[in-house]
Amino acid sequence: MRIMAVFAHPDDEIGCIGTLAKHAARGDEVMLVWTTLGELASQFGDAPHEEVTRVRREHGAWVAQRIGAQYHFFDMGDSRMTGSRAEALQLARLYATFRPNAVITWSDDHPHPDHRMTAKIAFDAITLARIPKIVNESGTGQPMPPAPDLGSPEGIESGEDVATLAALRDPVRFYQYYAPASPYPEVVVDVTDTIEAGADVMAYYHDFYKWAWTKDQYREGRAAIGRMAGAGAKYAEHFTLRVSHLPARPYLD
């Protein structure tokens, strides 16, 4: 199984890091994707964009290494995302390259516009990735933006020597962070076995951002979800599954 987590800013992934770590430990391929560098964080001050990029790549590499995942950064502009087709097309090309079976992202109603726009393009990109003429289009006469090089943390800067991408037509299950207003079915994942990976990632960002939020509070939040879910889950994470109709099953469970 291949799972891609698509979020706007480094640290957004904390809400699903236990789930990602659990899948990676099972042998599934996991990729963390951020649509922006989160460059407006006050910790960067007036640092040049090149320095922000360096630091954020270090953050992504550390988190990915901690849970056994790959990672990729886009640079769509912190607090400047629009949810445009062009943004979704960048992500669609990454889908066509990594070929995820499942995507995890933000809910549709989060107050931060980047979070909402990331959820929007993550969903839109599923359809765009299905159409060969779209996922391979150049559009403006400029070289087609390249398929991301998943073997290099530096990515590709030019549009040269671009291979034709195969459209992703397989079903993609679309998970979002739980939101009470969501009309979609809820999914709870037992992350008891990987709670420490999540706590470590939370603490890593805590040291950078100087949060008041602590590892103990992180664990308690996951414990509250576990208590709600029951069935012996000490710690859990909470999602919705965006589908119109769930597939048929042989029996109720």
Image (cartoon, rainbow, N blue to C red):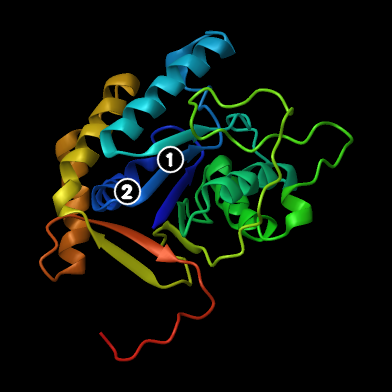
At label 2, which amino acid type do we have? Leu
Residue extending furthest bottom?
251
In the image, 217: left or right of 81? Answer: left
Picture layout, residue 253 above or below residue 134 = below
Picture layout, residue 240 above or below residue 115 = below
In the image, 11: left or right of 27? Answer: right
Q: Earlier in the sequence, mark 2 or mark 1?
A: 2
User: In this figure, which residue is indicated by the disc labeled 1?
Assistant: 32
- Location of residue 49 by image quarter: top right
Residue 78 position within the rendered picture, expressed as x and y whole percent measured from the top left: 58, 29
Residue 134 position within the rendered picture, expressed as x and y whole percent measured from the top left: 76, 52
Please tell me how crowded label 1 is: few (under 14), some (14-19), or many (20+) other residues with Cα within 10 Å.
many
In depth, the one of 141 and 55 nearer the eye is 141
Residue depicted at x 14% and y 51%: 193
At label 1, which amino acid type do we have? Leu
- Tell me the quarter of the image containing the C terminus: bottom left
Residue 20 has which mark?
2
Question: Are the residues tagged 2 and 1 within 8 Å (C-beta)?
Answer: yes
- Location of residue 189 by image quarter: bottom left
Residue depicted at x 57% and y 40%: 114
Q: CA distance from mark 2 to mark 1?
A: 9 Å
